[in-house]
């Protein structure tokens, strides 16, 4: 009897061009292994990730969404990640209050040099989302 | 420092207020007034810009009804250009707080405005108010008396029942009804030099705050208690995806809630803009992906996005719920989320013009749990 | 004379990159040659810098005409059409003269042909020879054929010729036959107008100082090694561990001045104190259980923000500071712990044990540097650093050859970057005007309206690297049926020149107007950054590259199914992304030539002259009736000597320059407009107002001397400031022969609660005046009461000299300041001597106060200019290290005391750097906007101005005439803050519009 196939979450990543996207490249050139569940979208800055994009991904059926930005203080655009942090705070507070699984939304600061942190974070987010199971919205036609 | 004066009440509370407002026009302290006026039919009140003192005799800012949040109207008047003449605006707390937020958003101007606040015991829905008017010739006075006795009023809108800001913040003048012996007079509170000037020019008798502060505190505490109770209940009703969907089940994407919202200031809603105009193949594609697609679609996305945009500034006036044709408890969701989100930034919408909008600023050391 | 518009920059560290970018931005051709096979020098080994713990290397990238340069972390590399990078290359000969040099360069091959190498790394895998990683300071291991810098992209493999055994293992493994096992030397000749020397430093090798046990004791490391250990990309993955047992040390001792301030190197390396404080602070933040002690002689916190940072580390992070030069390091052989004998103030020497010791190694000239200087014919100083001319930090002994950074003496990044800007600015005086820049000559492209997107996809097998791991057939089959697709093709190597032709041909044949490539990291470079790709008719904006190798194959080895699913998804997303792109014309903004310089001190005059040299009109506005500023009150500097000729010469040059228009007794009262197009109102003496139209503004308003209220100043005739002493010595009013004893008190008004910053110049001033007193009257007793002597860099030798001449330097603490009192005719100075703890009573003829520098009324001017000031009242630069002459508001630059305290030489350098920035803007006729800029949908805009509030670049404004919100496209950096701030969707980002992002998200799920 074939074993039931393990749940493979789909995780949308919004990665800042200056840091997390570079860290992803670095992880790649160093061949660090991480789960293939991530679907990266390169953005110029974590501050350009409109919460509506995150919601759109989540409501569209993404099992997880992760926003990767520069370490606070390091933003190429001076303060984009500080602003992103506030927006994500609102978004997560809202989701948590309404019980819409804010655990599916991650925000992480991963600098350009942190290839290992990128790979580790991708492992963590995938593991964590696997534990949560599939996003019920993925199949929900009624939203 | 606040200064106080007494408005004499020979002609009843409403009469005193009318007399005071007429006085403002007569003495040219304002050139016009924005104040709710009783409709000729008497069945309801509507906000009106009044320029002649005699028209003020129909003013009824005490009527427990809020057909529209007047902050929206002040914005309408002052958006293109600020008021050329002195305009007095009589506002409840939620209206004044919304106005402050709109000023921060550059959607209204306080230039040449005299902000006249009024202690608020809450309001009914438009229909309930109409009913109460039909039932009693002195419905406003009856309401006032009931409210001052502290009796529970089941007709009060939920937003008002849990509103912890019965007293307007930042008004030039406030018509004080709380903790005041109305038999002796209404307490007029001047919160700014502008307000003090009015008291002086009108030659009003100076007074003391008396029992006002304790009464305000008591009511605020009661309301806060009620808020906790109600929000807990709301959370039980809406929390979790299933309940959320059930709550929004009847939403038809009419966007009336955002039209009634005093703060949703976009010319055209993001959700009505071309961003949300999709090719037919998209709709069919989505339906294919999930097997079915509720129409109109993006209902949850609309409400969540509107929350994201506006909830940090939500003053909790509750008109969104009033506007909904299908009784979606939009206010419940907004107040619940607003309470939590505003706590994160220690932000009280409308508290002060000097407080920056949370989304235009940041602190380097904050929110340690967001991102590691 | 000037025959060339090209410059040769030698050394591609931070100084070389900065100088090259400044020159390239101004339109000149730059050859940036580097001895090593990768760029970045020492800075790329570091992740965090003082005084803010941030990494901000990318701040050096141009903000105007930004699409010309690469838009990614500079650690990965640099792409700019104006900069040609020459790796493994050294300068071997030089002929000609300034304006017309002919340089001989020699390049040693890396052994790996870059045009063939696909970066697969099979060679490294095969190589049996392990070597120490230089990048990791020998702490990590690598192979004899490897990538020198792990961050570099594309990955440039190179053979370490010294370690390579020529075994040939790699040659057989290389799928593209890119490896040759013998080095080849090739030479070239370049014609350049000027040369910039930016070769940096070599860290002192502590094996030369055997007493510290370096390399004998495993737990003794250098500060640079610690930097690699703390780096997440370093040998321990960012974990603080010690070599002997891999444990996190519970205590660490930093030993300062290793290889600095000693007999052989009588100079201060300037950067090590702050470097140690930074590392200590980072450790305390991340490993709060680790005790950190810094043993130092003087804590040299002379730069902007440094003293605050030190106080923060000491008071809030609990770093321990002990004033003591540790003579010798011993080890407990059992535990490998470090034993130090240290003596704190007033205490007996005690033995202390630490689990790790860090040697703060100083900067020395690179061993080959002397040879290079000989080739170039420039003089070096007694330690082998490049000698500069008086009052200049960048002019070498040879006309047309400039130096910057640590090549001219040890220094930190901030000063290095300023000097690089100055060198770049000054080098242009020998260059012919650059040809019109692409920005100015290229007409705006017409948008291809309503062109239906037709996507052509090429999938690279990367030899076997991708093809063996992914079923490309099935992938091709899947994407072939996606909407908008017209052609899919597989090729063995997308990076080969043949493939490039095939791609161009394929796209044409199938009428493709969008190109999606599935390849590797090299493709990004080849097809998006490579000029050739653009020339082949493939607009970078129409190309999307999916990195199937680094983003899929290499990182998802054991998940073939998931990797395949991801591949389909990524390609689908890229196709959708490409389909959704539109190409509105890129706008050009005209630049008004002409500059305004505010302040007529040495900073302002220098900047004005530098700009005027480019035949640009300069308005020089000075508040007072005459030019000269603080320089009028100075008579000499420690290192450059007499300042009178400098002042006279500069004044003459300014007054005789027809491009400079003087506005004396005038003030700036209003500004409007933006970079390239400012209108500035000047109020003149007669209260009338002039309105000037200029393209750039330089703030050079200077600073002021602190007027002391302490130490009986103003009450006793015998108490005066250093400046007054200098003046009276110069005028003869004070004759040192008539004095027997002088006391100088340092840090008067500096490094205190109200002004927690070091004024940088006062120690040098005291040493200078003390030496002058001693020169005239060797018998005079001079006591300098100080808290730390800030004789950084080569100033140290004068500190040594002063001590040799008998000047006494006596320390005092902030909590036990000296007391000055008058008893009748006698002036008494008392203080607690900290070493012995006893009370010292001096009875000098004069007490001289070293008063600090305080800011002028900068906030007022800052308000007019819409720029910021810092917590001390000086102007706040765009970024501390890499943009210290810029403001965030583009087109306005700052230099001199207006920005922070500094000496004359440093002020001149910063003024030259600021002028260089301004010239670069002013000589471009037009500014070209980036492709990704924000725009306004007026129909939707409610003018709430949230977008203006959140824009850090002054790129959004309310138009005065139309009252609409407008985007100044040349200034927009494309960060998207405005888009997210706008609730109505009136703010959009080209190339990343909401609708495009939505489609991209949808594509994830298909």
Image (cartoon, coloured by chain):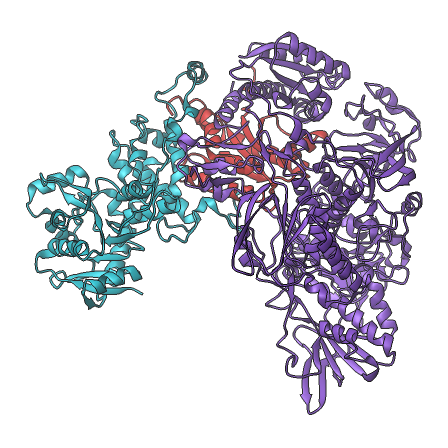
Chain colours: A red, B cyan, C purple
Tag count in the figure?
A: 0
Query: Whole-percent x and y of residue A80?
Result: 55, 41
Q: Is residue C206 above or below residue C592?
A: below
User: Quarter of the image holding residue C874?
Assistant: bottom right
Query: Whole-percent x and y of residue C372?
Result: 91, 44
| Residue ID at (80%, 62%) | C645
Q: Is residue C288 above or below residue C723?
A: above
Decide if residue C806 is in sight here.
no
Q: Is residue C44 above or below residue B2?
A: above
Q: Nearer the viewer, residue B67 or B109?
A: B109
User: Quarter of the image holding residue C341?
Assistant: bottom right
State the quadrant of the N terminus of chain B.
bottom left
Decide if residue C319 is in sight here.
yes
Query: Whole-percent x and y of residue B370?
Result: 52, 43
**In the figure, is residue C949 to the left or right of C129?**
left
Q: Is residue A97 above or below residue C317?
A: above
Residue that extends furthest to the top in the rendered view of this protein: C509
Residue that extends furthest to the bottom in the rendered view of this protein: C824
Q: Nearer the viewer, residue B154 or B127?
A: B127
State the quadrant of the C terminus of chain B.
top right
Query: Whole-percent x and y of residue B105?
Result: 39, 44
């Amino acid at each position: 009897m074939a074993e039931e196939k393990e749940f493979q979450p789909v995780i949308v990543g919004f990665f800042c061009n200056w840091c997390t996207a570079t860290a992803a490249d670095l992880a790649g050139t160093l061949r660090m292994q991480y789960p293939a569940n991530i679907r990266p979208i390169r953005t110029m800055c974590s501050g350009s990730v409109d919460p509506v994009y995150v919601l759109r991904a989540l409501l569209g059926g993404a099992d997880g969404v992760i926003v990767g930005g520069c370490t606070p203080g390091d933003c190429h655009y001076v303060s984009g990640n500080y602003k992103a942090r506030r927006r994500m705070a609102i978004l997560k507070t809202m989701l948590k209050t309404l019980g819409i699984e804010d655990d599916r939304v991650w925000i992480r600061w991963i600098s350009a040099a942190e290839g290992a942190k990128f790979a580790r974070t991708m492992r963590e987010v995938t593991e964590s989302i696997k534990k949560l199971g599939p996003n019920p919205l993925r199949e929900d036609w009624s939203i | 420092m606040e200064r106080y004066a007494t408005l004499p009440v020979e002609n009843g509370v409403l009469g005193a207020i009318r007399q005071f407002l007429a006085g403002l026009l007569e003495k040219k302290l304002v050139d016009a007034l924005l104040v709710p006026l009783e409709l000729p039919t008497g069945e309801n009140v509507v906000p009106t810009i009044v320029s002649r003192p005699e028209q003020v005799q129909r003013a009824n800012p005490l009527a427990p009804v809020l057909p529209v949040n007047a902050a929206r109207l002040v914005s309408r008047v002052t958006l293109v250009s600020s008021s050329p003449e002195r305009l007095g605006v009589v506002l409840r707390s939620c209206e004044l707080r919304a106005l402050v937020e709109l000023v921060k958003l550059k959607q209204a101007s306080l230039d040449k405005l005299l902000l006249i606040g009024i202690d608020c015991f809450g309001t009914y829905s438009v229909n309930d108010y109409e009913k109460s008017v039909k039932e009693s010739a002195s419905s406003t006075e009856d309401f006032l008396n009931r409210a001052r006795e502290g009796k529970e009023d089941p007709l009060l809108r939920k937003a008002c029942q849990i509103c912890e800001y019965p007293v307007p913040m930042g008004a030039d003048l406030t018509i004080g009804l709380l903790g005041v012996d109305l038999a002796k007079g209404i307490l007029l509170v001047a919160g700014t030099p502008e307000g003090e000037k009015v008291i002086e020019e009108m030659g009003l008798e100076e007074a003391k705050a008396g029992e006002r502060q304790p009464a305000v505190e008591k009511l605020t505490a009661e309301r806060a208690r009620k808020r906790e109770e109600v929000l807990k209940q709301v959370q039980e009703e809406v929390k979790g995806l299933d309940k959320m969907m059930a709550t929004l089940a009847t939403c038809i994407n009419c966007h009336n809630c955002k039209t009634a919202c005093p703060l949703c200031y976009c010319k055209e809603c993001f959700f009505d803009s071309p961003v949300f105009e999709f090719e037919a193949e998209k709709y069919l594609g989505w339906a294919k992906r999930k097997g079915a697609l509720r129409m109109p679609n993006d209902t949850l996305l609309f409400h969540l996005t509107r929350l994201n945009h506006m909830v940090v500034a939500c003053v909790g006036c509750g008109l969104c719920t009033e506007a909904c044709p299908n009784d979606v408890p939009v206010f419940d969701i907004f107040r619940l989320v607003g309470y939590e989100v505003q706590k994160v930034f220690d932000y009280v919408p409308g508290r002060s013009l000097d407080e920056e909008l949370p989304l235009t600023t940041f602190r380097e050391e904050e929110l340690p749990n967001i991102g590691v | 004379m000037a025959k060339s518009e090209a410059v040769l920059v030698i050394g591609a560290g931070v100084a070389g990159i900065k100088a090259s970018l400044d020159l390239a931005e101004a339109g000149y051709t730059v050859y940036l040659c580097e001895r090593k096979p990768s760029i970045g020098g020492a800075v790329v080994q570091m992740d965090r810098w003082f005084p803010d713990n941030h990494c901000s290397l990318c701040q050096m990238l141009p903000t105007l005409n930004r699409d010309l340069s690469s838009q990614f972390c500079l650690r990965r590399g640099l792409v700019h059409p104006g900069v040609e990078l020459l790796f493994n290359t050294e300068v071997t000969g030089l002929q000609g003269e300034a304006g017309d040099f002919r340089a001989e360069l020699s390049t040693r091959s890396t052994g790996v042909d870059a045009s063939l190498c696909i970066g697969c790394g099979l060679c490294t895998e095969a190589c049996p020879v392990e070597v120490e990683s230089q990048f990791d300071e020998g702490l990590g291991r690598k192979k004899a054929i490897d990538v020198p810098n792990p961050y570099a992209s594309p990955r440039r493999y190179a053979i370490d010729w010294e370690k390579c055994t020529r075994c040939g293992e790699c040659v057989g493994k290389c799928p593209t036959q890119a490896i040759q096992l013998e080095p080849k030397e090739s030479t070239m000749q370049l014609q350049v107008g000027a040369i910039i020397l930016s070769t940096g430093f070599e860290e002192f090798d502590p094996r030369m100082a055997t007493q510290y046990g370096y390399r004998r004791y495993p737990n003794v490391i250098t500060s640079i090694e610690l930097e690699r250990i703390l780096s997440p990309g370093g040998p321990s993955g960012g974990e603080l561990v010690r070599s002997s047992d891999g444990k996190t040390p519970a205590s660490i001792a930093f030993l300062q001045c290793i290889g600095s301030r000693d007999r052989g190197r009588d100079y201060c390396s300037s950067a090590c104190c702050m470097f140690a404080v930074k590392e200590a602070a980072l450790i305390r933040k991340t490993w709060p259980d680790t005790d950190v002690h810094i043993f130092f002689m003087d804590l040299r916190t002379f730069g902007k923000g440094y003293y605050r940072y030190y106080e923060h580390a000491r008071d809030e992070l609990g770093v321990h500071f002990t004033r003591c030069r540790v003579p010798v390091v011993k080890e407990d052989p059992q535990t490998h712990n470090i034993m130090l004998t240290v003596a704190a103030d007033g205490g007996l020497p005690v033995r202390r044990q630490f689990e790790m010791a860090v040697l703060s190694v100083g900067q020395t000239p690179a061993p080959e540097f002397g040879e290079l200087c000989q080739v170039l014919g420039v003089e070096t100083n007694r330690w082998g650093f490049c000698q500069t001319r008086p009052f200049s930090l960048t002019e070498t002994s040879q006309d047309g050859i400039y130096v910057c950074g640590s090549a001219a003496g040890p220094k930190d990044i901030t000063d290095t970057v300023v000097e690089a800007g100055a060198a770049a600015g000054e080098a242009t005086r020998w260059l012919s005007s650059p040809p019109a820049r692409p920005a100015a000559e290229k007409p705006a492209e017409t948008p291809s309206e309503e062109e239906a997107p037709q996507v052509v996809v090429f999938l690279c097998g990367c030899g076997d690297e991708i093809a063996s791991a992914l079923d490309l057939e099935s992938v091709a089959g899947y994407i072939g049926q996606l909407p908008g697709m017209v052609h899919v093709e597989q090729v063995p190597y997308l990076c080969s020149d043949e493939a490039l032709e095939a791609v161009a041909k394929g796209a044409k044949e199938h009428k493709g107007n969008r190109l999606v490539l599935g390849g590797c990291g090299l493709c990004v470079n080849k097809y998006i950054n490579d000029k050739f790709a653009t020339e082949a008719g493939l607009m970078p904006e129409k190309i999307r590259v999916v990195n199937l190798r680094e983003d899929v194959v290499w990182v998802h080895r054991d998940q073939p199914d998931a990797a395949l699913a991801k591949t389909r998804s990524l390609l689908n997303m890229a196709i959708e992304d490409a389909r959704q792109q539109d190409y509105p014309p890129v706008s050009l903004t005209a630049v008004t030539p002409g500059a305004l310089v505010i302040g007529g001190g040495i900073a302002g005059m220098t900047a004005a002259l530098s700009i005027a040299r480019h035949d640009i009109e300069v308005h020089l506005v000075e508040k007072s009736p005459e030019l000269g500023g603080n320089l009028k009150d100075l008579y000499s500097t420690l290192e450059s000597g007499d300042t009178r000729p400098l002042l006279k010469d500069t004044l003459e040059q300014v007054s005789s320059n027809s491009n400079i228009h003087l506005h004396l007794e005038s003030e700036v009262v209003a500004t409007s407009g933006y970079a390239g197009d400012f209108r500035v109102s000047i109020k003149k003496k007669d209260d009338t107002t002039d309105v000037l139209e200029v393209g750039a503004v330089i703030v050079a308003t200077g600073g002021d001397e602190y007027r002391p209220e302490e130490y009986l100043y103003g009450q006793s005739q015998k108490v005066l400031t250093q400046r007054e002493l200098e003046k009276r010595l110069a005028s003869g009013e004070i004759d040192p022969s008539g004095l027997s004893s002088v006391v100088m008190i340092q840090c008067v008004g500096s490094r205190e609660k109200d002004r927690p910053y070091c004024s940088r110049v006062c120690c040098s001033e005291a040493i200078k005046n003390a030496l002058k007193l001693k020169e005239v009257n060797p018998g005079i007793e001079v006591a300098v009461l100080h808290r730390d002597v800030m004789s950084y860099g080569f100033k140290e030798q004068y500190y040594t000299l002063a001590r040799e001449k008998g000047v006494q330097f006596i320390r005092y603490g902030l909590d036990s300041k000296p007391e000055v009192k008058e008893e009748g005719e006698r002036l008494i100075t008392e203080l607690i001597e900290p070493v012995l703890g006893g009370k010292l009573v001096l009875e000098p003829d004069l007490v001289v106060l070293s008063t600090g520098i305080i800011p002028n009324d900068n906030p007022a001017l800052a308000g007019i200019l819409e720029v910021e000031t810092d917590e001390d009242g000086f102007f706040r630069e765009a970024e501390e290290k890499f943009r210290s002459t810029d403001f965030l508001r583009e087109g306005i630059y700052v230099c001199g005391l207006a920005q922070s305290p500094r000496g004359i030489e440093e002020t001149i350098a910063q003024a030259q750097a600021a002028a260089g920035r301004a010239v670069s803007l002013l000589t471009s006729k037009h500014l070209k906007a980036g492709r990704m800029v924000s725009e306004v949908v007026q129909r939707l805009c409610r003018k709430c101005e949230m977008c203006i509030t959140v824009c850090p670049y002054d790129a959004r404004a309310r138009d005065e005439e139309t009252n609409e919100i407008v985007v100044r496209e040349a200034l927009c950096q494309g960060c998207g803050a405005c888009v997210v701030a706008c609730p109505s969707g009136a703010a959009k980002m080209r190339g990343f519009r909401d609708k495009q992002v939505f489609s991209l998200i949808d594509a994830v799920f298909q």
